[in-house]
Image: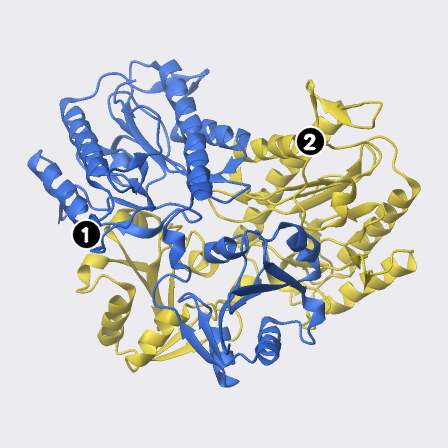
Chain colours: A blue, B yellow
């Protein structure tokens, strides 16, 4: 027993640590796992709460038990106590602290892959949490649909709601208020209209207009458990131009066909490449010119859990077959600077014969 | 010019990187600074937005310019291009990537202190952002005061509001809705009543009661700039017990005397220790027994900016005199398992002759 797993992080921000101890703290603390036994060393500020909230089997120790009160000396004391000679750390472990431990004669080995490989495969209680996250995202999306349905179209094409011009900011606020009512939060919510929708990560700002796409990508995080929801819809207020309708139909087909193909044993890159090719065949090619990138230039999806983006990636670079139990987004999109973008996103649990879709809200274009 | 600063992080989560580029991205990207010139390498997904949003003087480069598309190969190409032999990295740089760079013959040196030491000293535009953050926290606090003022006290002492028993969860939601209306977010908001208030980091849950302290520690983050506000008040609905009143008076005096003492040239630990001693003399000693910690067992304050907790710390371990321009919280508190806790928090800018208080909302006990 001279090898231990080691993390030093704030579990409120580090999902590996939160996964291991099921306890969210805003400040960094030391975690070790040796011979399957887990220990954490927390400050006076967190001690009582950690004792009541940390996962069963996690030994909670007070910083005051140790003679030093910085992370380095706590770790050195733990190493001496347990006879640890080598620490296995996550690849994102702080190099400053790692170098200090090495200078003191300990071996520090970054883990090449996931620190807890099992995080990639969700147990039922985790699937339920992601499902709850998606329900919250859907509540926000329904609120957005309601606001857009209630909006009027001015002669200029500008949308008008509740006595005011309707902007991305106002619509975003209405969505996030709904998240808060469901005890979830979101620091970033995409409501991008018109040509802004051509930039997949643009949050969106300013007046919203009829007749052009409004991409809404909502990713609330549950305040209690820390799991995320993720949901994207694209709608047009009023009548959609022909090119937007055709892009919508192509992306919708691609999403649903990708959902059908994603199951245990399937290689993610093949499904991603199918989508790229299908979209190109439907008249929506991917490429780059002097105006920038166009077409489908992001991954088809990503794992979803305690991190909004986690393993496995569903993109052109992941050639590892799915095993079942992964929870992934399926979110094809096309983006053109001439008219904007369309993205449609559902979430599935990878199954043996087929995948189960956790997303329930309908997909439509015109509102 | 063979030495460069290097960061690889998501600026939406890493405040050093956000500070350097003034651009918030959800995914990791590579940053280097060589000879005072800054470059970032971003994916297609972020390229257009980075070009329009990144700070003046930051050169934005596309990942597609490079032959590899992982961070390691991008960094190796940058090193070759600029003739870099040594990278200076933040102490929290990922050890996995650092080890890979070292294996390829590059020197990787973690910075012992702050990566951008100037972050500790706020320029006026940053002070304004923190002030805005505090204004949002105050809006949330006023909403809480309003709800508590409107609440009725049942025969059992339980509070009742808007036709329902008033819980920590409901009061928290009302506060956070106010944050959202101000384009700010909070993933953690403390509303801890009764004995829960004796645990400084307890978020609080369940029924709220008259006649016992309710600690409200609000820290919203501005969605646009990423700066934080921080504000704590403790109130009692109805009449406060004598011990709670005495603790409140002692903590209020300690806070205001600490604010008066904190200025350029002053040693933070001396002010922290003054508060500990003053509170003990007022009948509120600090210590630890078989029930856990009691008294004043956290730091007096912390720097506030793009991180909710940053340098400088105002605690018993920081012996470095203040220099002026720091923005710090001043938040003494006392906590006893017998009756709960009191914490009162304002924020000041450290000045030459005196500090300027950014917090405006009043401090009172009974509501």
Structural distance between the alpha carbons of marks 1 and 2: 49 Å
Q: SS class of the residue under badge 1?
A: loop
Q: How crowded is mark 1: few (under 14 residues within 10 Å), some or many (20 or more)?
A: some
Question: Residue A62: horizontal and vertical position, in percent?
Answer: 68, 64
* Residue B325 in view: no
Q: How crowded is mark 2: few (under 14 residues within 10 Å), some or many (20 or more)?
A: many
Foreground of the two, A12 or A235:
A12
Subunit that carries the residue with mark 1: A
Q: Given contact means CB atoms under 8 Å apart, are the residues at marks 1 and 2 in contact?
A: no
Subunit that carries the residue with mark 2: B
Q: Residue at x 77, y 49 (%)?
A: B198
Res. B156 image quadrant = top right
Foreground of the two, A245 or B356:
A245
Question: Residue A244: horizontal and vertical position, in percent?
Answer: 18, 27
Question: Disc 2 designates what residue?
Answer: B167
Res. A356 image quadrant = top left
| Res A316 label | 1
Q: Viewed as shown, does residue B224 lie left or right of B299?
A: left
Q: SS class of the residue under badge 2?
A: loop
The answer to whether B107 is drawn above or below residue B92 in the figure is below
Q: Which residue is drawn at 58% across and 35% down?
A: B176
Q: Quadrant of the C terminus of chain A?
A: top left
Foreground of the two, B312 or A310:
A310
Q: Viewed as shown, does residue B247 lie left or right of B146?
A: right
């Amino acid at each position: 027993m001279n090898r231990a797993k080691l993390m030093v992080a704030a579990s409120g921000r580090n999902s590996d640590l939160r996964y291991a101890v099921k306890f969210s703290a805003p400040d960094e603390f030391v975690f070790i796992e040796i011979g399957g036994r887990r220990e954490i060393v927390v400050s006076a500020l967190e001690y009582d709460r950690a004792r009541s909230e940390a996962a069963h089997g996690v030994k909670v120790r007070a910083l005051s038990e140790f003679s030093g009160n910085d992370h380095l000396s706590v770790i050195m004391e733990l190493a001496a106590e347990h006879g640890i000679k080598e620490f296995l750390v996550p690849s994102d472990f702080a190099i400053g602290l790692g170098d200090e431990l090495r200078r003191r004669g300990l071996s520090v080995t970054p883990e090449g892959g996931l620190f807890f490989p099992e995080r990639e495969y969700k147990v039922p209680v985790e699937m339920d949490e992601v499902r709850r996250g998606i329900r919250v995202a859907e509540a926000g999306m329904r609120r957005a649909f309601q606001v857009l349905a209630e909006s009027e179209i001015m002669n200029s094409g500008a949308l008008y709601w509740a006595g005011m011009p309707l902007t991305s900011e106002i619509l975003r606020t209405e969505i996030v208020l709904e998240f808060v009512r469901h005890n979830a939060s979101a620091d970033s919510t995409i409501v991008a209209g018109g040509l802004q929708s051509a930039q997949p990560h643009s949050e969106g700002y300013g007046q919203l207009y009829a007749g052009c796409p409004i991409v809404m990508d909502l990713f609330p995080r549950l305040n209690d458990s820390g799991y995320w929801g993720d949901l994207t819809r694209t709608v047009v207020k009023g009548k959609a131009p022909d090119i937007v309708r055709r892009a919508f139909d192509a992306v919708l087909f691609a999403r649903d066909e990708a959902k059908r193909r994603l199951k245990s044993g399937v290689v993610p890159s093949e499904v991603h490449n199918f989508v790229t090719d299908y979209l190109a065949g439907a008249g929506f090619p991917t490429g780059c010119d002097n105006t920038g990138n166009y077409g489908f230039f992001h991954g088809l999806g990503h794992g979803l859990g305690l991190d909004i983006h986690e393993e496995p990636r569903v993109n052109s670079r992941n050639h590892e077959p799915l095993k079942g139990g992964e929870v992934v987004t399926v979110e094809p999109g096309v983006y053109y600077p001439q008219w904007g973008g369309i993205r449609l996103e559902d979430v599935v649990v990878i199954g043996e014969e087929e995948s189960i879709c956790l997303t329930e809200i309908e997909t439509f274009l015109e509102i």
